[in-house]
Amino acid sequence: MDRLAALPNTYKLVRRDARTNRTIVQLPNGASFGGEVLAICAGPCSVESREQIEATAQAVAASGANVLRGGAFKPRTSPYAFQGLGAEGLKLLRDAGDRFGMSVVTEVLDPRDVALVARHADMLQIGTRNMQNFTLLREVGDVGKPVLLKRGLSATIEEWLLAAEYLLVAGNAEVVLCERGVRSFDSATRNLLDLAAVPLVHSLSHLPVIVDPSHGTGLAKLVAPMAAAGLAAGADGLLVEVHPDPPAAASDGPQSLTFEQFKSLMGRLHAVAAAAGRQLPSATLAA
Ligand code: PEP
Ligand code: MN
């Protein structure tokens, strides 16, 4: 028996045998994580303007994404980098999601902003730098909205599952895990995308797992192959950064896909999804 599975009392609520069925997390527009139809979350790293988020929402919805992402509160390594539009960004994201029939996910950085973010978002993202912010986990555990919990920069699988356990203990069972790569010795890619985590977490927990090939590689040209690999590994969805003009993006331009690149990626993923026994959401003909 592997080491993690041999620790029966470590995770009480997230462990696979705590539930008969796997958890399926539903969003208001019908998108779900863990069902036969995959959740495809797409959008810019940061919400930058009404035009930018609306154009992106329209493009990704037309290509088949069913969840709109966009950061309003940004966790930037440098205090001099763009920190996000804050409350204004939340409104722009909400409006764009509503206009194109998409549910929205956005990051909450600070326990004091949980209520504000939850008023606008359908799903709250806890970013990699906050995976072990236990105060934030407890606060989000109480919020009554689904949570996207990214794996910490150098978190072990055990630490990640225990962070999810905090959310379940606090009363929030609607948790989706997101593998987004971990720190490694090699700077050739931004992070080392750990795709073995997908089947491993599925064997240890009933929670859905999605893959983020954008932060996982840091390079736009690697996003399509690693998105396909993530679905082949059994991921319940993807999170992909898309921007109208990646070189001009306020954050994460080098890993962001253009609208055309995203469309072509979605075209290629149908066969991979089918091989994995899943389906892509059907594209909406956006207004
Ligand atoms: C993001 O989704 O833009 C983000 C900051 O992600 P992570 O926490 O994985 O770095
Ligand atoms: Mn980003």
Image (spheres, rainbow, N blue to C red):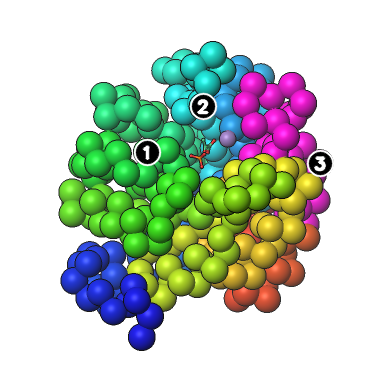
- 264 falls in the magenta region: yes
Q: Which is in the foreground here, disc 1 or disc 3? A: 1
Q: Residue furthest front?
A: 185
In this figure, what is the number of numbered marks? 3
In this view of the protein, which residue sits in the foreground, 235 or 194? 194
**Is 59 displayed left or right of 86 in the figure?**
right
Q: Which residues are magenta?
A: 241-267
> What's the mark number on residue 77?
2
Q: Which is in the foreground here, disc 2 or disc 1? A: 2
How far apart are the alpha carbons under marks 2 and 1? Answer: 13 Å
Q: Which is in the foreground here, disc 2 or disc 3? A: 2
Mark 3 crowdedness (10 Å alpha carbons): few <14, some 14-19, many ≥20: some
The residue that appears at 70% across and 69% down in the rendered structure is 272
What residue sits right under mark 1 in the picture? 130
How far apart are the alpha carbons under marks 1 and 3? Answer: 32 Å
**Is 269 displayed left or right of 146 in the figure?**
right
Q: Position of residue 179 (x, y in %)?
A: 51, 55
Q: Is residue 273 visible?
A: no
- Dot 2: element: loop
Quadrant of the rendered image containing residue 60: top right
Compared to 280, does 283 lie above or below?
above
- Dot 2 or dot 3: first in sequence order is 2
What residue sits right under mark 3 in the picture? 260
